[in-house]
Image (cartoon, helix red, strand yellow):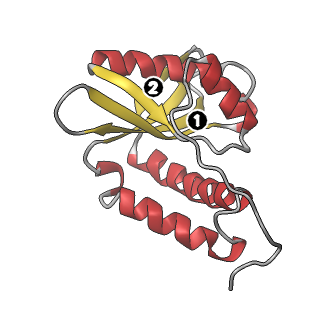
Amino acid sequence: MVKLENMSPADFDAYLEKLTANYAKDNVRSGRWTREEALEKSMNQINTLLPRGIDTQDHVFFSILDEGTGERAGYIWLNIAPGEGPKKAFIYDLIIFEEFRKMGYGRAALAALEEYAKEKRIASISLHVFAHNAAAVSLYRKMGYEVTSMNMTRNVSDAQEG
């Protein structure tokens, strides 16, 4: 159904724009950041993680393509952790474009990513998902991902900082 293709520099630029906006929005929705600071914080965190952009060592960027039409259905950002012992990977981001959601593209992209991981002798893949993203949580559970840690917050007043 899908194939993963290394992201081109042009695709990376388009992806970075979506990533920055989505990450800012998710952090506002989760209550971690204010709307006013979100975009700047999002850009700063992404720039820290990717000092060389698409060429940052140990990071791989894929376009998710429909095998039949060649249409781009989304993007994946994967980090392969360096070090001794079994290789581990972390999905920093998985975006399925709106028009491709609820059609099996997310499941197919994760399956293709698992095949890539097996070829690269990666022992495990981890990820983070915001609790408010029920569709993603459901997808990951169906694909066999398990909760390994959890952050919890309780608001105790209506006061906001600053």
Q: Nearer the viewer, residue 24 or 98?
A: 24
Rendered view: 1 above or below 18? above
**In this rendering, would 161 be left or right of 3?**
right
Counting from the top left corner in percent of width and height, residue 148 is at: 51, 33
Report which quarter residue 25 is drawn in.
bottom right
**In this rendering, would 14 be left or right of 130?**
left
Rendered view: 116 above or below 54? above
Counting from the top left corner in percent of width and height, residue 119 is at: 29, 16
What residue is shown at x 70% (from left), y 62% (from top)? Answer: 31
Rendered view: 13 above or below 7? below
Say which residue label 2 marks. Answer: 4
Q: Residues within 10 Å of mark 1 (few under 14, many from 20)?
A: many
What residue is shown at x 30% (from left), y 58% (from top)? Answer: 52
What residue is shown at x 25% (from left), y 47% (from top)? Answer: 57
Counting from the top left corner in percent of width and height, residue 115 is at: 40, 15
Counting from the top left corner in percent of width and height, residue 55 is at: 29, 50
Say which residue label 1 marks. Answer: 74
In the image, what residue type sits under mark 1? Gly
Question: Which residue is most to the left?
Answer: 84
Question: Which residue is most to the front?
Answer: 156
Of marks 1 and 2, which one's residue comes earlier in the chain?
Answer: 2
Judged from the image, the secondary structure of the residue bearing numbered disc 2 is: strand
In the image, what residue type sits under mark 2? Leu
Q: Nearer the viewer, residue 20 or 129?
A: 129
Kindly report the distance in space between the C-alpha atoms of the residues bearing marks 1 and 2: 10 Å
